[in-house]
Image (spheres, helix red, strand yellow):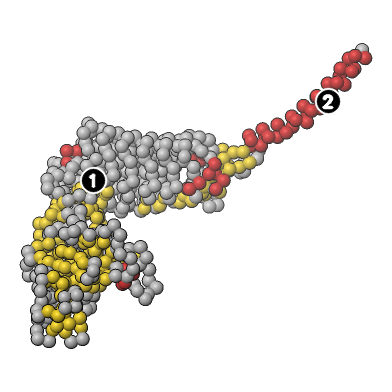
Amino acid sequence: MGGAIIRRFALFPLMLLMLLLLPAGMVAQTEASSSKYIATYESSTQTLTFKKFVGETLPENSVVVEDEMTVEDMNEKLGNSTIVHIVFDKSFSTYTPTSLRSFFKNLTKLETITGLEYLNTEKVTDMYNMFAFCFKLTSLDVTNFNIKKVTNMERMFSGCSKLTSLDVTNFNTVNVKNMMRMFTGCKALTSLDVTNFNSENVTNMSYMFYKCSKLTSLDVSNFNTKKVTNMSFMFSYCSTLTTIYVNDKFVIDKVTNGSYMFENCTNLKDYAPSKKDHNYANYKTGYFTKLVGKNGDEKIGAAGETLATDNLTLDDNKNFVSYEPFAAKAVSYSRKMKEGTTWATLCLPFEVSLADKNFRSFKLLSADDVTETVDLEEIKTSIEAGTPVIIKMKDGATNLSISEADKEIANEVKNAETSNGNYQLQALYTQKMFSKDTDNNCYIVKGDKLMNPAKLLKETATKSVGSKPFRAYMVDNSSAPAAGARMFSISVGGSTTAIEQLESTADSKAEYYDLQGRRLQNLQKGVNIVKRGGKTMKVIIK
């Protein structure tokens, strides 16, 4: 008997230790199980708020949120109240559903959703019907959605008829397979940017933009439709749509149903009611326009067997970018010269006839580092597309105005080198900034000189100078460009006229010298030093 008592006392410390440990485990389990995500309805404001809740007893008018539940499901448990506003609290951001299928569907009285950035979508694969038939929503902020795992976006915004803006530019749609009816009935949208959509895995695009009746243009130039089998009604009843931009990856090779693709798209160029299926989903003989470039913020589209745009108006305040060559039925460019400016540079992406122009055009022949003189040769007939030239205005002209018809547009520039390759004229279709400290191998026409930025900005605190589009600058290509502030005078080959010209270099009052300082009787071939009155100049005779 005594032995039994001893054994019971020996077990007591072990039992006590177990009792001490047990409550801690139980408390931890209770806290974990009492952490919930809930939706609470406030009748006075008709607001449903989503948040994280820790506790055992739910607040009044609350329901626990579980994966695959919809707001309709929650509202049924809350007594089918009228939901006008939805709020997502920051604490809800750790809730990670795998499906948001029909989540906001049929909330026909819903007017606002606040804090949508706290709806965590990183694990979501299904967004079918997510906002469908939210008739009163006028805006949605889905810019923070992470949708990289989503495969189904069918009807996602279908029937959101009052949405006036929708930013989906951050959507990563690489895994999406279904975009059927994605924007169907978004009748108030006047613009929709889907240029970042990756559609390489999409198989269904039927009704995708159906009845987006206020869209005037749509850019699907990033779409790759190699796997799409259904394009039926894709753009149908987009009655104000005038332009659909595409690229060569928008194909119909696997389409088995393309019926009524363009039904009632009456504002598309050359639309005909009998031509409405997927066979007209091309830019050669159909309704599409190929995106071939940008003129500032404006898209440049071309169509036809020979790619052509109707009109191209170039502007000094718009950068010009061409993705490929195309033609323009009409093209123009104008420039207002600064007062007192005679010399300038020019480079246009189309051929310019020099007949009856108010300027002369010159190409760069050579640049002499010793004499710091560049030599030019006049172009008499036309300037080739994309070719940089130096121009001189005639008779005090101050307006440059060029218009041409039926011209090829060059997407690449043709830089003009000197015969020895040490210097070249570099063409610009876009604005460029030149640094005072780092661009000393570049020379910009300023007044009657070609100056590098250090020379041009000498004695100023300014660090850089800009050049507008459709200009050119000279570049020193040598392996060791000269350092420091430099400038070149410019001479015109074949005559005795230079930019910093005297009224005449060939009269009795002029004195001529060679580079060694020897007096000459007259101008000779090569470099001449001409003194007249109190002025000295360099003249090159070819």
Query: Of 311 and 430, which appears nearest the observer?
Result: 430
Q: Is residue 417 left or right of residue 94?
A: left
* Cβ atoms under marks 1 and 2 closer than 8 Å: no
Label 1: which residue?
Answer: 246
Q: What element carries label 2?
A: helix
Q: Which residue is found at the position 54% from the left and 41% from the top?
A: 94
Q: Which residue is found at the position 90% from the left and 14% from the top?
A: 3
Query: Of 39 and 136, which appears nearest the observer?
Result: 39
Q: In this view, does 293 lie to the left or right of 123?
A: left
Q: In which quarter of the image is residue 57?
A: top right
Q: Which of marks 1 and 2 is nearer the N terminus?
A: 2
Mark 1 residue type: Val
Q: Which residue is found at the position 30% from the left and 64% from the top?
A: 482
For residue 196, the mark is none
Q: What element carries label 1?
A: strand
Label 2: which residue?
Answer: 13
Q: Where is residue 493 in the image (x, y as percent from the top left)?
A: 12, 69
Q: Quadrant of residue 509?
A: bottom left
Tell me if residue 452 can be seen: yes
- State how far apart marks 1 and 2 are (Cα): 80 Å
Mark 2 residue type: Pro
Looking at the image, residue 361 lies above or below residue 62: below
Q: Position of residue 43 (x, y in %)?
A: 55, 49
Q: Which residue is found at the position 11% from the left and 82% from the top?
A: 504
Q: Position of residue 415 (x, y in %)?
A: 20, 57
Q: Where is residue 364 in the image (x, y as percent from the top left)?
A: 17, 64
